[in-house]
Amino acid sequence: MRTLCAFLFALAVAQAETFQDPNAAKYYAEHKEFFRFATPADLPKDLTWQDGSGQKEFADPRAVRGGILRQFTPSTPPTLRRVGPNANNGFRGELYDNNDFGLLSSHPNSDEPIPALATSWAMSADGMTAYFKLDPKAKFTDGQPITADDYFFAFYFYRSPWINAEWYVDYYTREWGGITKFDHYTIAVKAPRKRPMQLENLGELRPIPRNFFKDFGPTYEKTYNDRFQPTTGPYYVTKEGFQREKSVTLTRVKDWWGDNRKYYRYRYNPDAIEFTVIREIDSAYESLLAGEIDFMPIGMPRYWYGTNEKKAYLDGYVSKVQFFNDIPRPPYGLYINTQRPLLNDRNIRIGLQHATDFQRVIEGFYRGDYERLNQFSEGLGKYTDPTIRARLFSPELARAAFAKAGFTLTGPDGILMNPAGERLSFRLTFDTSDRRKYLATLVESARRCGLEYRPETLEHTTMYRKVMEKNHDIAFWAWSVSGRLPALWESHHGDNAVDKLADGRKVPKRQTNNITGIDDPELSALIDKFRAATEEPDMIKLSHQMQQRIHDNADFIPGFRVPGYRLAHWGWVKFPEGFDVRSAEDPQSYGLFWLVPSERDKDLKDFRAGVVRGAPKTIIEDRWRTE
């Protein structure tokens, strides 16, 4: 009896220690139509519960736990915050996007729903509400249990003006219809309207660790700038693990909740992942060949083909892999800031498209291994309009478009001018990655059209800040694509383009994904209609209309699409049969590989002693190839 009382007391203390934000509670009370409280007896009796157990397991049971994965990063992220200014940086995938889960996941080969933080689910008869039973064993990386209250808090957090992130405020207001708590581990989430893939949309909801946000308030940006937000994934960053401009170390959670779950066991196997700052890609490549980095992408042709001449490859220690995936294609290309002088003229932008020779870059710099991207939204199946094609390089068509904008005179250096004496000259911004080496190709091709591109190369974080502040003319960029439906509000809606001042003037809106600043009422209206649409045929039609309007606006110059990833790895890094899954953007997307540290020690000793291990090995895995 005494033992039972002690247990109940400890349980009560633990529950009392779980923070409940009074401001959040007040917010729930003020929005009773959205935040609902019920009991298990209120659950509908006709629900058919599913658990996704019929899907095939995709991780390899041969995988072993342990070791330190050595990686590199060109710079540390400007902030550890998950949302808010500067949070949407290139390192966020490692910290959060690949290291967190929603209620459900999608099977990476079949796209069918599989359990994540929910162990089972059911849909209402009208298809508007999804019911979820949460895994009571699941915890955040700080040890806090994940309960229904953390899903409630997510809506309070993401709707708050304190995060200074309008996309989240809009999304968590417009794209959800309500949430109900039946008990600590049973919730229901309602949709705002009928739409395709309803379960998948509702199953994306991720909890926010309310204990971590005890200090959430107006000082959010500063208070949480260098603090890792606990996730539901297997890795976390300690205070010591973030050394600005030196390294970032992700440490694995001991006894992670997913270790014994069917679709999560045998994954995320290293005990730690160390990202050391190596600013120059050539230096990182040399570190790989010396065994100081375990694997790295070698998508650049001079690394892929150049590896054939390197001792680590020739002696059988390093393998090359070409893995073809099947994912929506990130829109690599040039983003034109339409809020800048001259670039606000559509004729100028059309001329820029004809004056930018990406096909020459693909054939020369990429040796024909990449393919021309034709539009902003590719790889979305029937939601992509296959009839839209990128404008071809043509000095004649470029000059004709520039002439419509009044640039009919030629200066002494061959650059076009208008009667006011303005030169057709724009700053072209790249980061300091290997891509900057084809800047000369774009500059030379543009000059043939009477256009001057003034090249600018910036360290990655510096470039990111410049573009997000809308201080660029034209920048090489790409956004990751997380779903198979077009999501164009953040990148092309007028709400994210300009701020309207009290005197009626418009100024560029900072820190939004609309980095072209496009403010087209017709396109914005199409985006609004798409977001409100409920029937798939209407959504497909609207999707094609949006893509055509983006093509007509010419604010984006399509660059190239990459049909998969290329990797070089040492032999102590092991991969499953088939190497990776269909939806993987890179090996760390699903974490299926594992390390054998004892082999690392032996391999490096033999390699440095000149021992030949075997024949060079190149693996081509193309079972998911679509192009």
Image: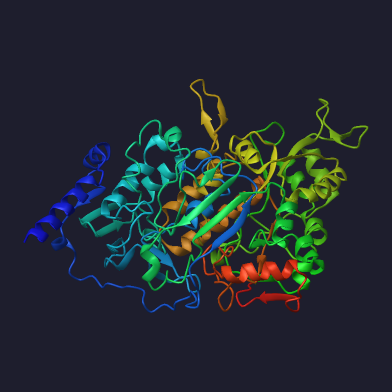
Looking at the image, which is closer to me, 83 or 246?
246
Q: Quadrant of residue 449?
A: top right
Most distant residue in the left direction? 1
Q: How is the image coloured?
A: rainbow
The N terminus sits in image quarter: bottom left
Q: Residue 483 or 282: which is nearer the viewer? A: 282
Residue at (13, 62) in percent of width and height: 41
- Above or below, 550 against 424 in this view is below
The answer to whether any part of residue 116 appears in the image is: no
Where residue 65 sits: x, y (%)?
Answer: 48, 68
Residue 111: x percent and y percent? 47, 70
Nearer to us in this view, 185 or 491: 185
Q: Answer left or right for 424 relative to 251.
A: right
Q: Residue placed farthest to the top in the image? A: 503
Left or right placement of residue 620 versus residue 166 in this view: right
Residue 508 percent coordinates (x, y): 57, 32
Asked if residue 6 is positioned above or below residue 110 in the image, the reply reads above
Which residue shows up at 63% across the image and 73% down it?
Answer: 625
Q: Which residue sits at x=50%, y=76%?
A: 60
In terms of image quadrants, where is residue 515?
top right
Q: What is the x, y in percent for residue 209?
A: 34, 48
| Picture mark count | 0
Is 194 on the left-hand or right-hand side of 107? left
